[in-house]
């Protein structure tokens, strides 16, 4: 199956790698340079589009669609991400245009997108901010047209197989059952990147700079990966990205290969960073698909000295900011 909704992996690989949407406010040139590198990388899927703030207009929808066509010509599956927080009629118009195009699969960022996409009768991806915490909820969304789900980052890996029992085939059936509830739904998890914690109608980056949201001077562009916040003792804690709050630490599942397989996960999402991302991609591909030692990869990632460090607590059901360094 080809086209939107197809879940194509070009070779036998344990995990398909997905580049998540760029969360920071990057310049047009920076975005094109980044995606040019992604086009030459090992990843199968790329999520594009502005998903955080409607005021970021460096790239319009037609620009994203053109970029998507370039990535598809390079052999990548392209998914068009939608905003997580819909606040105005103009946001809804953009959402309807995204749902109306038939070039690329769309990732639903919130319930508004679910409503529009289900109404259009097109397949879609359930984004990580859709609250799927039970098998019944996943079946319900499958009936609406979901062909893949990105599990909420806080879910322990052991919970995933209970919500979406592993299927023998990660593909999307060409013809769905009458209720659409029995077809396989691919499970994707965030495997690397800052944890998306919250969205707010208030822009905290603007507030930090003593500016209003409507006159923010786009100060979020000064911090490509978010504005780092620390506790009173100097420990990095959070990162502000406009209306989004992120963890300072990078969630990292480089040592969880066996647990991911046991949970039925077939897709790993890597969230872009302004520096070092090509090495992150290479390390995850080596460990997850080519049996490279996880300990070696973990040490190389730790040596990159990410602000806030690494964390994997959620994977084992612990506190999200814990880092066990365990490998498998």
Image (spheres, rainbow, N blue to C red):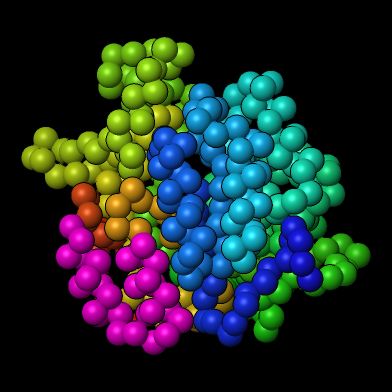
Q: Position of residue 98 (x, y in %)?
A: 71, 40
> Image quarter for residue 206?
top left
Q: Position of residue 28 (x, y in %)?
A: 46, 37
Residue at position x 48%, y 54% in the image: 36
Q: Residue furthest right?
A: 178
Residue 8 placement, left or right of 322: right
Looking at the image, residue 76 lies above or below residue 25: below
Instruction: Give the magenta range.
Output: 278-305
Residue at position x 43%, y 51% in the image: 34
Tell me the chief SS of the magenta region. helix
Residue 288 placement, left or right of 184: left
Looking at the image, residue 8 lies above or below residue 49: below
Question: Would you say residue 16 sits in the magenta stretch?
Answer: no
Looking at the image, residue 299 lies above or below residue 318: below
Residue 163 can be seen, yes or no: no
Residue at position x 8%, y 40% in the image: 233
Residue 204 placement, left or right of 176: left
Q: Quadrant of the N terminus?
A: bottom right
Question: Would you say residue 282 sits in the magenta stretch?
Answer: yes
> Image quarter for residue 182?
bottom right
Looking at the image, residue 265 lies above or below residue 250: below
Residue at position x 48%, y 52% in the image: 35
């Amino acid at each position: 199956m080809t086209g939107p909704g197809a879940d194509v992996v070009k070779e036998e690989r344990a995990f398909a790698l997905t580049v998540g949407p760029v969360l920071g406010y990057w310049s047009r040139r920076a975005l094109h340079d980044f995606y040019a590198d992604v086009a030459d990388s090992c990843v199968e899927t790329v999520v594009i589009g502005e998903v955080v703030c409607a005021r970021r207009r460096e790239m319009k929808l037609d620009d994203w669609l053109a970029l998507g066509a370039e990535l598809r010509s390079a052999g990548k599956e392209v998914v068009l991400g939608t905003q997580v927080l819909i606040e105005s009629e103009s946001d809804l118009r953009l959402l309807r245009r995204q749902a109306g195009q038939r070039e690329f699969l769309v990732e639903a960022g919130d319930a508004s997108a679910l409503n529009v996409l289900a109404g259009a009768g097109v397949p879609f991806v359930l984004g990580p901010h859709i609250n799927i915490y039970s098998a019944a909820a996943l079946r319900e969304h499958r009936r609406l047209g979901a062909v893949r789900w990105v599990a909420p980052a806080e879910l322990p890996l052991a919970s995933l197989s209970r919500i979406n029992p592993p299927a023998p085939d990660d593909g999307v059936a060409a013809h769905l059952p009458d209720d659409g509830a029995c077809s396989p739904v691919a499970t994707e998890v965030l495997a690397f990147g800052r944890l998306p914690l919250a969205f707010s109608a208030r822009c905290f980056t603007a507030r930090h700079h003593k500016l209003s949201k409507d006159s923010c001077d786009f100060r979020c562009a000064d911090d490509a990966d978010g504005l780092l916040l620390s506790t009173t003792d100097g420990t990095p804690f959070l990162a502000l990205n406009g209306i989004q709050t992120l963890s300072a630490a990078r969630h990292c599942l480089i040592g969880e290969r066996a647990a991911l397989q046991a949970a039925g996960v077939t897709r790993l999402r890597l969230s872009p960073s302004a520096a070092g991302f090509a090495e992150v991609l290479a390390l995850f591909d080596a460990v997850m698909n080519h049996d490279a030692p996880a300990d070696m990869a973990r040490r190389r990632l730790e040596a990159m000295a990410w602000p806030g460090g690494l964390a994997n607590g959620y994977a084992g059901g612990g506190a999200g900011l814990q880092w066990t360094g365990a490998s498998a």
